[in-house]
Image (cartoon, rainbow, N blue to C red):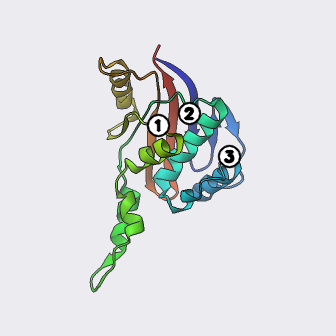
């Protein structure tokens, strides 16, 4: 396996292929700043939850820089907290005597929505998976097994850790990984 692109995003910094990216905003505002600077043409971004925004921005920045989106054939992401931030937001819309849960929030109560958003945007028709794991290191054998499966003809995957437990508490480390 060979990593050709890598991005790391925290609430205060972005590092793309080892190079820090200057940002003027922090926390959830930083994701909007990055969207406006590097994407700007996908209005659905503003409906996404923070986890989806995080994975989407990371994927966009890597794929636009390398122009490899047509070669990526799978999206494999993981985290430890699933979609807990959005689950809590959704639960807050349900209160005793005022049962009007938000359908707009409900769709993001599944962590795999971020893999779907990336796949839709880049026309990736292969595997999209989101795993709930204890730590980031547990994802590597899953990616290796997926790339090396006998049934698989995968050559390149977008994979990584994409964690968001609160609106301003997130971390992503995504990579474009090639099967050599």
Residue 69's disc is 2
Q: Residues within 10 Å of mark 3 (few under 14, many from 20)?
A: some
Please report the residue visible at 62 percent of the width from the left and 40 percent of the height from the top: 61
Secondary structure under tag 1 reads loop
| Marks 2, 3: nearer the viewer | 2
Q: Nearer the viewer, residue 26 or 175?
A: 175
Find residue 145 and report its horizontal and vertical position in percent. Answer: 32, 22
Note whether residue 8 is visible.
yes
Q: State if disc 2 and disc 1 touch (CB < 8 Å).
A: yes
**Does dot 2 land on a helix, a strand or a loop?**
loop
Outermost residue toward the bottom? 97
User: Label 2, label 3: how many angstroms apart (C-alpha)?
Assistant: 15 Å
Residue 48, disc = none
Q: Which residue is mark 3?
A: 38
| Residue 14, image x, y percentages | 63, 42
In this figure, which residue is indicated by the disc labeled 1? 124
Name which of mark 1 and mark 2 comes first in the sequence: 2
Q: Report the front residue among 101 and 50.
A: 101
- Point out residue 147 in the picture as x, y percentages from the top left corner: 38, 22
Question: Distance of mark 3 from mark 1, alpha carbons?
Answer: 20 Å
């Amino acid at each position: 396996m060979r990593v050709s692109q890598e991005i790391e995003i925290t609430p205060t910094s972005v590092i793309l292929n080892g190079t820090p990216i200057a940002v003027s905003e922090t926390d959830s505002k930083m994701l909007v700043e990055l969207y406006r600077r590097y994407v700007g043409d996908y209005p659905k971004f503003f409906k996404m939850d923070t986890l989806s925004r995080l994975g989407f921005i990371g994927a966009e920045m890597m794929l636009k820089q390398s122009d490899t989106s047509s070669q990526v054939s799978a999206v494999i992401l993981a985290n430890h907290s699933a979609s807990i931030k959005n689950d809590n937001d959704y639960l807050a819309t349900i209160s005793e005597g005022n049962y009007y849960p938000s359908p707009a929030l409900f769709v993001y109560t599944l962590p795999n929505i971020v893999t779907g958003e990336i796949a839709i945007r880049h026309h990736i028709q292969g595997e999209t998976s989101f795993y709930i794991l204890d730590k980031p290191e547990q994802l590597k054998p899953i990616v290796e097994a997926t790339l090396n499966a006998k049934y698989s003809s995968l050559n390149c995957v977008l994979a990584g850790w994409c964690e968001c437990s609160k609106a301003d508490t997130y971390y992503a480390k995504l990579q474009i990984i090639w099967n050599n």
